[in-house]
Amino acid sequence: MKTRGSLIVLSGFAGVGKGTVLKTLFETQEGYAYSVSATTRQPRPGEVDGVHYFFVSKERFEEMIQNDELLEYATYVGNYYGTPRAYVEEKLDQGFDVILEIEVQGALNIKKKVPDAILIYMLPPGAQILHERLKGRGTETNEVIAKRMLRAAQEAVCVSQYDYIIVNNDVDECAANLHALIRAQRLRVRSNLPFIRKLTKELTNLSEKGE
Amino acid sequence: MKTRGSLIVLSGFAGVGKGTVLKTLFETQEGYAYSVSATTRQPRPGEVDGVHYFFVSKERFEEMIQNDELLEYATYVGNYYGTPRAYVEEKLDQGFDVILEIEVQGALNIKKKVPDAILIYMLPPGAQILHERLKGRGTETNEVIAKRMLRAAQEAVCVSQYDYIIVNNDVDECAANLHALIRAQRLRVRSNLPFIRKLTKELTNLSEKGE
């Protein structure tokens, strides 16, 4: 029996380590697909169409909105960002677990459109550790760090609307926990209705034969 | 942070191998508690009070019903069977995942009383295999086997009301999958609200300090 994959929406504060954990997950485990967003912003040096983003025109993006081709979309600094539905559906049908890395509002929008989506929020073990990680990067000004901490505090109140949390204490352990959590979704009854129906039919046939 | 355990309700057709899988789970993993039922029936030779069942009088059982001391109860062949609430709550508070092995109606009753309970149904890989396992025991008459197959066919239509299924193809693999599934429940947001609240408060304090 081939089980349809799960749509996994992953969010987390800036600096919590989503990118590193996902990199480890993809390098150590099979069966995952990463959902590539569409955007109307210009590619930055080194960004590849179809890998980092699908780069599309404003007209094309608005056509996608009209045709309901997007699972969700948002505007940010004058540009559109959205999740193309077709790619996600295709990969789910092929049995991949599709990971969508997205911020809180987009995540909650996805949950409305796709109730089966699993919302996971990655948290640091403590607030102080998040602060130290942001400082430790050495690339951000104190002002930017303060803004990120404020944003984290604001976002934290939305975490209770997610399905699961995952604590990033250690990258390998966090990736392993994330993998176990995602694989467990394959055991959900709603992901296995064809198998359950088939088995019920077989049992009925066998018991009607009086065996 | 200490996470409260999950209440796990496990059901499955007669002959599917629940007992063997649970034995393997308890022998290979820690942190589990098995909920012992109360009953008014007489102990059979070898059965120990508090291990196999809590053996109580009819009067005491009806008192437990009156005092809402039972998570669920049912009558079977003139005797009461039920799940004492206190033991389950105590073990959950201590951080144990509590396993309750119970039939379909009891399981669905538990879900009504304890919406956080996780309902897992153990299935055979196919109907024919279940039939062969029942025959292979060599202890049942053909008539009993036919009745069990009929009952399995009837019960199968209730499986869609469970949360998860787990297929018993291989005992060790099934126990490992069951363990991963149960451990994943500890990542549920609703099991981690105290931690989320604490972190939110810390983040707010830090960002108010302007750090």
Image: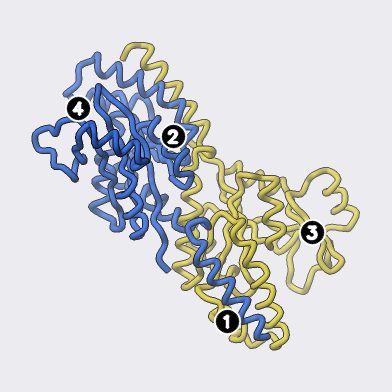
Chain colours: A yellow, B blue
For residue B137, which numbered disc appears in the image? 4
For residue B83, which numbered disc appears in the image? none
Q: What residue is drawn where x is 66% and y is 55%?
A: A35
Quadrant of the rendered image containing residue A68: top right
**In the picture provided, is A15 more to the left or to the right than A63?**
left
Position of residue A53 relative to residue A46, above or below, is above
Residues at discs 3 and 1 in contact (Cβ within 8 Å): no
Instruction: Give the labeled residue for mark 2.
Output: B108
Coordinates of residue A191 in the picture (x, y in percent): 53, 39
Badge 4: how crowded within 10 Å, few (<14), some, or many (20+)? Answer: few
Residue kind at label 1, given as amino acid type: Arg
**In the picture provided, is B116 more to the left or to the right than A58?**
left
Residue A185 or A154: which is nearer the viewer? A154
Badge 3: how crowded within 10 Å, few (<14), some, or many (20+)? Answer: few
Q: Chain for mark 3?
A: A
For residue A133, which numbered disc appears in the image? 1
- Please check whether the numbered discs 3 and 4 fall on a single chain: no
Q: Comparing marks 2 and 1, which lies closer to the viewer?
A: 2
Quadrant of the rendered image containing residue A57: bottom right
Position of residue A112 relative to residue B187, above or below, is above
Q: Chain for mark 2?
A: B
